[in-house]
Image: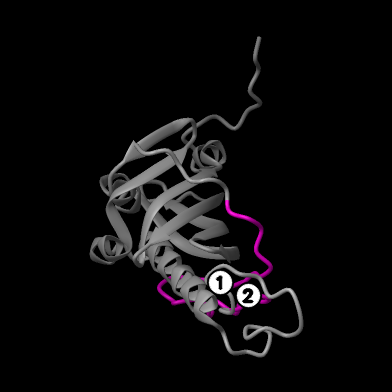
Amino acid sequence: MPASRTAPRAAPGTALGRVEGRASGASPGSVAGMTDRGGAGTADRGGAGAADRGEPGTVGREQERNVEVVRRYLRTFVTKDLAELAEVVAEDVEIYGSGTAVCGRRYPEAAVSSPGLTVLDQEIREIFAAEDRVVVSLAQTYRRDATGATTVQSACKMYRLAGGRIVQFWGEQDTYGLLRGLGLLPDAPITFD
């Protein structure tokens, strides 16, 4: 896999929203402080920029599109719509997390279509766009279909987009808490004796 790019610089805006069931969620919001003057990714260092006046510039529109692509991807965990997933995730997507690195859309497809596990609710707690990246903090309520047990799993993910598709993502989720909450691991303290 090619080396990842350097970390993006901090961006000045956030957008919040919630997605429940098959709902499309709230609009991605504006990207405050960004303007299209001076080229893409330029912060407005003086006066009110286009985004501050409610007139998003080129950078703001691209970031809003990127946020919508990530929202569409996350929604596939609720809808299990693999056709929509294919529209927003590159075939050769690079995935990093939990100490592993894999390549290929088949990995998120397998996660979305996990037999015996249903996402009942999805709450996007925060979604933040910066240049070609989108960072999301979310919670998903899962049901283990065989037993009816439910639990909430929290996660934090960062996506890099190109050409309207997710091409890389990094993240961690509380898999241990998910397994304990669904009764797949004992609800007892772990000892490291």
For this orientation, the residue located farthest to the front is 38
Residue at image point 27% right, 65% down: 87
Specify the amino acid type for callout 2: Met
Residue 32 lies in the magenta stretch: yes
Q: Can residue 20 be spotted in the picture?
A: no
Quadrant for the C terminus in the image: top right
Q: How many numbered markers are drawn?
A: 2
Q: Which of 19 and 36 is in front in this view?
A: 36
Q: Mark 2 points at which residue?
A: 34
- In the depicted structure, whether residue 97 falls above or below residue 163: above
Mark 1 vs 2, N-terminal side: 1
Label 1 environment density (alpha carbons within 10 Å; few <14, some 14–19, many ≥20): some
For residue 162, side relative to residue 106 (left or right): right
Q: Position of residue 187 (x, y in %)?
A: 59, 32
Q: Where is residue 62 in the image (x, y as percent from the top left)?
A: 47, 73
Residue 95 lies in the magenta stretch: no
Residue at image point 36% right, 44% down: 94
Q: Is the magenta stretch mostly helix, strand or loop?
A: loop
Q: Name the residue under label 1.
A: 18
Q: Which of 159 and 162 is in front in this view?
A: 162
* Proximity of marks 1 and 2: CB atoms separated by less than 8 Å: no
Q: Position of residue 165 (x, y in %)?
A: 35, 62
Specify the amino acid type for callout 1: Arg
For residue 147, side relative to residue 155 (left or right): left
Specify the segment rendered in magenta.
Answer: 8-35
Q: Nearer the viewer, residue 46 or 30?
A: 46
